[in-house]
Amino acid sequence: MDSLHAIGFYASAAISLGGGLLVAFLPGRAGRGLALALSGLGIAGLYASLSADFAGLLALVCYAVCALLIAGPRYRIVDSPIGMPWRQAGAVAAAGLFAVLAYAAFRGDFVHAAYKGGEFGIAGIGRLLFVHDALATEAVGALVLVALVGAAAAWRVRDRAR
Amino acid sequence: MNAGLVSVLFVAVALVAVGAFVATWKRDLTAALAGLPLMFGGAGVAFAGAARFSAAGDPKIFGQEVAALLAVAALALVALGVGIAGRGTSR
């Protein structure tokens, strides 16, 4: 990775992680949505700096829609019955997860391979999605279908209950 | 300045941990849903980094494919979660 890509990578990492922390600490739904969009922008930048341009473009669109859903008028509050001690324990567990995975990444012995890069990659990814890994693509398509049908059904049930 | 696979994995791990933190820290379960795309994004960054730096065999863009699928799956799960949470009170 050359210096320009490395600078883009670290800047995108800072944006994505900063956005993620803002999602955790901002109180309002609009602020959380904006922070999630910012984090999505950083993740898309990470993909782009890793020569995964098509995945970056797709992630940009998906995270923008996620941010709209989080910040939109359909948002409803569902309070959790879990108390503060358990939430604090979860935060400590997240920190422990980071420590364990970071140690594994640091101590890992990985294969180094050359990567030519430079292409957008949509044709190759399309061949992988629809020929090599068609079952995985169909599984994600089924997940999207079930999620959209479930969301539409839940919204309709709520509208009828009014 | 340079970035290798370990740097990529560190960022990916941090994204997964921040997503897990959001999912556990928020009292509002709908707000906690925002942790899912962060965790999926971290996993996708790890896959894309492995494809970029360490994919020895074919196909070399397998990690990019998984990253794209994870982004779509995150969107689907957030849509489903926001839809199911629609019975709560608006704020």
Image (cartoon, grey):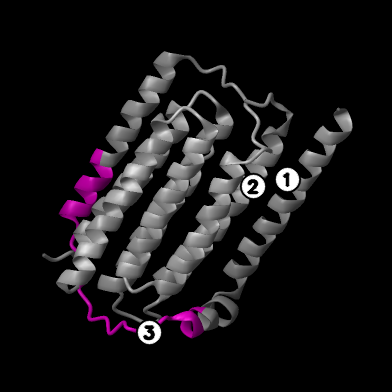
Marked residue chain, label 3: A
Q: Are marks 1 and 2 in contact (CB under 8 Å)?
A: yes
Q: Which mark is residue A151?
A: 1
10 Å crowding of disc 2: few (<14), some (14-19), many (20+)? many
Q: Amino acid type of disc 1?
A: Ala
Q: Is residue B66 visible?
A: no
Would you name the residue on which mark 2 appears? B79
The x and y percentages for residue A146 are: 72, 53
Tell me if label 3 and label 2 are in contact, CB under 8 Å: no
Return the residue at label 3: A119
Q: Which mark is residue A143?
A: none
Q: Which chain does the residue under circle 1 lie in? A: A
Horizontally, residue A102 falls left or right of residue B38, namely: left
Residue A105 relative to residue A138: left or right: left
Toward which corner of the image does residue A74 lie, by quadrant?
A: top right
Under tag 3, what secondary structure? Answer: loop
The correct choice, above or below, for A104 with respect to B57 in the image is: above
**For residue B17, side relative to residue B67 (left or right):** left
- Of the pair A26 and B41, the residue shown nearer to us: A26
Instruction: Please state if B29 lies on the left or on the right of B9 as rendered.
Output: right
Query: What's the magenta region?
Result: A99-125
Q: Residue at x 69, y 26 (%)?
A: B88
The residue located at (77%, 47%) in the rendering is A152
Q: Position of residue A87 (x, y in %)?
A: 42, 22
Name the quadrant of the N terminus of chain B.
Answer: bottom left
Tell me the distance, in whole angstroms, between the alpha carbons under discs 3 and 2. 32 Å
Q: Tell me residue A54's x, y (percent).
A: 46, 73
